[in-house]
Amino acid sequence: MEGKLNYKNTFLLGFGFFCISIVWPLYNAFVPVFLSKYISSALMIGFVMTFDNIAAITLQPFFGALSDRTNTKFGRRMPYLMVGIPLSAVFFALIPFQFNLISLIAIAMGFNIMMSIYRAPTVALMPDLTPSANRSKANGIINLMGGLGAVLALFVGPMLYDINKLYPFAAAAVVMIIALLILRKTIREPEKLMREEEEHTGIIKAFFEVIKDKDRSALLILIAIFLWFVAYQGVEALFTLYGVKYLGLKESTAAFLLSFFSLTFLIFAIPSGFIATKVGRRKTIMTGITGLLVVFILITFFRNTTYIAILLGIGGIFWALININSYPMVVEMTTESKIGAYTGLYYFFSSLAAITGPPLLGFIIDYIGYGSLFLISVCFLLLALVTMMFVKKGESKNIINHAE
């Protein structure tokens, strides 16, 4: 599987991630509005909105591992896209047609289940099709495509919603189908992987395999992923309240400030993959953790929105160094036949952080105040940095050979 990165195919593969990313901003923006018509409790609305994270720690790992053991004329990953994308598109388009709470919850559950069918198999296609040495570059390109999908949804979706509540959902569904047609026409899975006789591993077996591994590198990086996602998810979820309650800003101003973080992450997605290819993934990730840690410490000393915006923009660059290179490290620690299972483990730990991070940081803030938000996140980043110091595997083959 060695060779140069096929940029054309990687960008085309990115349509899978584009397809995933275009729906979530619209879902997160408008489904709470629909829910508020039927229930007034913010707690209950919040619970319904965790369906995607619950699916991410249960169904996504299962389908990722199941795709490892699939062998059809369409490939081992593609059948999940062919089923999951059209069905999730149908459920997504149905959201505006809900007529009571039960129908809305049923549609939301159906949508989340269908998304879970193809999300991990879609992501697992990247290491299937990409040489070890180029996976960080490829992951940067794919994340750029995903970011473009999210940006498109956030800019165009509200305008369509103002015209007709159905339009953004119908438009996203159509884009999903188009993305599937592009993937189906252009992506060909390697026959070697489709016919591989090597032993496959279910998600539970893969988890115990990681625990029992004497090297501990796979377990340690999964723990580090959990820790830095707790820090990130906590800041992302609570920053608007931090801006309002601690900095004295309007809600819109606080939300706008956080967009600088997302923008620089998007811009630096591809460069971060090139950097890791040159100097190594572990070193790149540790640089990113250290840099983000320093940025979060500095933010606590400023109340000026210009300085905070600049620091958040710098933080987005460091977050790209971390986030773009962590998944390639995880799949580098297993064999080709188990990539789907390890993709599932990656999503399990990152999604578990998404579920536990905001309430955990919120619980601490309730006692010591919003001014501590970034310092609490720094504690988790420090733990992640220490954990990464003991990770010994996960580099691409050419980096390992060069070191030798």
Image (cartoon, grey):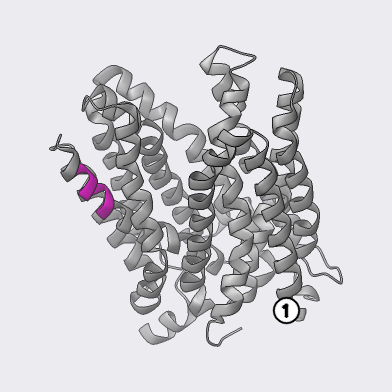
Q: Looking at the image, which is closer to me, 271 or 260?
A: 260
Q: Looking at the image, which is closer to me, 127 or 283?
A: 127
47 shown above or below 394: above
28 shown above or below 261: above
| Residue under the image location 77 percent in, 66 percent down | 76
| Residue under the image location 63 percent in, 75 percent down | 129
Q: Looking at the image, which is closer to me, 326 or 18?
A: 18
Q: Position of residue 371 (x, y in %)?
A: 22, 27
| Residue under the image location 28 percent in, 32 percent down | 373
Q: Which residue is situated farthest in the front direction here? A: 163
Q: Which residue is mark 1?
A: 190
The part of the chain drawn in magenta is 308-314
| Residue under the image location 29 percent in, 34 percent down | 253
On the picture, is 138 further left or further right than 357?
A: right
Name which quarter of the figure residue 402 lies in.
bottom left
Q: Position of residue 82 (x, y in %)?
A: 79, 58
Name which quarter of the figure residue 41 lies in.
top right
Name which quarter of the figure residue 280 lies in.
bottom left
Is the magenta region chiefly helix, strand or loop?
Answer: helix
Q: Quadrant of the N terminus?
A: bottom right
On the picture, is 286 further left or further right than 66?
A: left
Residue 209 seen in this snapshot: no
- Element assignment for label 1: loop
Q: Quadrant of the C terminus?
A: bottom left
Say whether residue 130 is magenta.
Answer: no
Q: Looking at the image, which is closer to me, 393 or 43?
A: 43
Circle 1: is it few (<14), some (14-19), or many (20+) Cα within 10 Å? few
What kind of residue is marked 1? Pro
Q: Which residue is situated farthest in the right direction here? A: 73
On the picture, is 288 further left or further right than 269?
A: left
Residue 356 seen in this snapshot: yes
Q: Position of residue 147 (x, y in %)?
A: 48, 56
